[in-house]
Image (cartoon, rainbow, N blue to C red):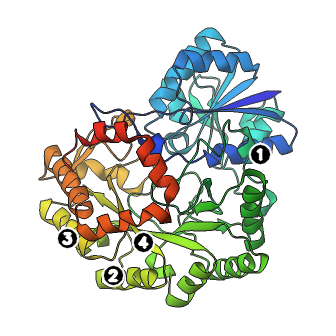
Amino acid sequence: MKVLFLHPHGSNWLKGHNDITTVFNLMPPLGILGIAAWLEKNGIDVEIIDGYAAQQTHEAMVEKIIASGCYAVCFSCTTSSFPETDRIATLLKQKAPEIVTVLGGAHACTIGETLLDSYPALDYLVIGEGENTMLELIQSGFTGVEKIPGVAYRGPDGKGANSGFRELIQNLDTLPFPAYHLLPNFPKRYKLPLFSYPKSPNTSIISSRGCPYSCSYCDRSVFSRGFRFNSPEYILEHVAMLNRNYGIRHVFFYDDLFTFDRKRVAEFCALKEKKRITVSYNCIARLEHVDAELLALLKQSGCWQVNFGIESGDPEILKKHRKFYGLDEVGQKLLMVRKAGMRVKGLFMVGLPGEDEAAIRRTIDYALSLPLDEINVTKFTPFPGAPVYKTIREFGEFDENWELMNCINTVFVPRGMTRQQIDDLYDEFIRRFYHRSHINIGYAKMLWKSPHSIYTFLSHLPEILAFQLKQKW
């Protein structure tokens, strides 16, 4: 019995622009790869179509699905890529109604079984972690699904129903490494964000699941609020395997909280040095989980860049949306990272509920005062499943157009503001940060620090210039 996984692109980037993001940042679909590896380990034939890596028409995708001879096709999608998923599934059902369609990922988990009431081309949803649920669905031949935990299905009345909660996998080390080998042209086609790595080829790893925090804007519907993680030995062998089998020289630990368990990280750093694994890495950390001693260990073991979710420079906005951390302390912690010899990237949002123009300007000014090498700015998007979603219309105007909900389009406007204000402040934020001499000098140094980024940049200069000419940056 063959299963095909499809990762729809779902691009609706910015009106009037071609989506050039995948030229400069394309990470493998690790969720799909993890489930695929588990199925392969249990003797099931698997194929993957990654719509991000090789964009195709819906017709071409459907023809490829049918030609594969698969029994079931499993889509994994976000909210913004769900409409494309439905279009592909609808076309597939018209041409090959016998192929079972399954949907997993964040959108399926947040909306749940009611999704089946409005989208007849979808047969089943996987709710929560997918490894064991998918395996049992396939082994059962999609019979008796109401007895398989973690499944949404249509009941006798034709309405969506839920089979119940699936227990989480407690020991993540029992899972095989993601099935990178199923991706055509891996690792050449995949790359981390431009200028965010010193070496190529590179890729990403997720070494933990869940998050114990409850920020208003984060959806924890797939992995819950618990925190589970791979052991230091497992992580190191994962890195070593990527280096050995694919020549990977740099990885990005894409965990929400890589440094949450200090003992685990310290053991990983020590083990990596002992085994002389020379692969460098980036990671994401929360400010309360780093200190000078830990940062020294990260640097010594090959850490190149640490990313921090700062979100806002307005203390009142921060108190409303996440665990508060003193703004003065943020600068001190970031400076510690720089002094330890690593790059620092700050992650920010504009348009949060309760913000006004003055609050966003405070964030911009604050970001410019911090010792940051790089920033990433997104537009607040109230995703289904995030705590703020249920009451979001009390705080402003929300255009719940799933296809636009990609953190780049403006879909939420706080009360008292306009969409144009949000867009203009977003542009101003990026322009003011990057139009500074010391930031430009920092990127000039990348000529030798990140030579592959320079090569990629120059190789796609026409696309960059065409995009830049349309911006206010």
Q: Residues within 10 Å of mark 4 (few under 14, many from 20)?
A: many
Given the image, on which type of amino acid does mark 2 rest?
A: Gly
Taking depth in this image into account, of 77 and 120 the one nearest to the observer is 77
C-alpha separation, residue under disc 2 versus residue under disc 4: 11 Å
What residue is shown at x 36% (from left), y 86% (from top)?
Answer: 332
The label number, if any, that marks residue 344 in the structure image = 4
Q: Amino acid at mark 1?
A: Ala
Q: Which mark is residue 331?
A: 2
Quote the CA–CA distance across marks 4 and 1: 33 Å
Q: Position of residue 376 (x, y in %)?
A: 36, 58
User: Which dot marks residue 365?
Assistant: 3
* Element type at mark 4: strand
Callout 1: 10 Å neighbours few (<14), some, many (20+)? Answer: many
Q: Amino acid at mark 3?
A: Asp
| Between marks 4 and 1 in the image, the one whose residue lies nearer the viewer | 4
Q: Position of residue 102 (x, y in %)?
A: 64, 31
Q: Which mark is residue 37?
A: 1
Is 355 positioned to the left or the right of 114 in the image?
A: left
Q: Measured from the top left, where is residue 32 in percent x and y?
A: 66, 43
> Are there few (<14), some (14-19), or many (20+) residues within 10 Å of tag 2?
some
Helix, strand or loop under label 3 = helix
Say whether disc 4 or disc 1 marks the residue closer to the N-terminus: 1
Q: Is residue 422 above or below residue 152?
A: below
Q: Nearer the viewer, mark 1 or mark 2?
A: 2
Mark 1 or 3, closer to the camera: 3
Asked if the residue at tag 1 contacts the one at tag 4, i.e. Cβ–Cβ closer than 8 Å, the answer is no
Can residue 313 be seen? Answer: no
Q: Amino acid at mark 4?
A: Val
Q: Are marks 1 and 2 in contact (CB under 8 Å)?
A: no
Q: Earlier in the sequence, mark 2 or mark 3?
A: 2
Q: Residue at x 42, y 72 (%)?
A: 344
